[in-house]
Image (tube, rainbow, N blue to C red):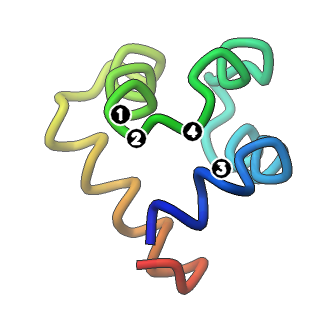
Amino acid sequence: MWRDVQHSWQDMLGQIVRRWPATAAEDLMQIEGDRSRFTDYLARAHDLTHAEAEELIETWLREQRLA
């Protein structure tokens, strides 16, 4: 669940940057685990639609067994 990601946001930053290399840890820290802000940021950073970014996040959550 996203709540788990949000609670562990600082610990997840390395995984997120490795998964999505166009992201920056400094930017992610400002997002503070807010899913909507992360989705918007990911879409902008990787030139994706909001729906595409959301799908990538859902896939990542399933892989992390957090969905």
Badge 1 marks a residue whose secondary structure is: helix
Seen from the viewer's position, the closer of residues 9 and 48 is: 9
Q: Do the CB atoms of the residues marked 4 and 2 lie less than 8 Å apart?
A: yes
Measuring from the top left, give residue 3's x and y in whole percent. Answer: 50, 62
Q: Please give the label number shown on residue 61.
A: none
Q: Could you tell me how far apart the alpha carbons at marks 4 and 2 are, in whole angstroms?
A: 6 Å
Q: Residues within 10 Å of mark 4 (few under 14, many from 20)?
A: many
Circle nearer the viewer, 1 or 4: 4
Name the residue carrying label 4.
33
Name the residue carrying label 1.
39
Circle nearer the viewer, 4 or 3: 4
Q: Earlier in the sequence, mark 4 or mark 3?
A: 3
Q: Please give the label number shown on residue 35.
A: 2
Name the residue carrying label 3.
19
Q: Earlier in the sequence, mark 1 or mark 4?
A: 4
Q: Residues within 10 Å of mark 3 (few under 14, many from 20)?
A: few
Q: Earlier in the sequence, mark 1 or mark 3?
A: 3
Seen from the viewer's position, the closer of residues 1 and 49 is: 1
Residue type at mark 2 is: Arg
Q: Do the CB atoms of the residues marked 2 and 1 lie less than 8 Å apart?
A: yes
Q: Residues within 10 Å of mark 2 (few under 14, many from 20)?
A: some
Measuring from the top left, give residue 39's x and y in whole percent. Answer: 35, 34
Q: Could you tell me how far apart the alpha carbons at marks 2 and 1 are, in whole angstroms?
A: 6 Å
Residue type at mark 3 is: Arg
Picture residue at 78% right of the left edge, 14% below the top: 26
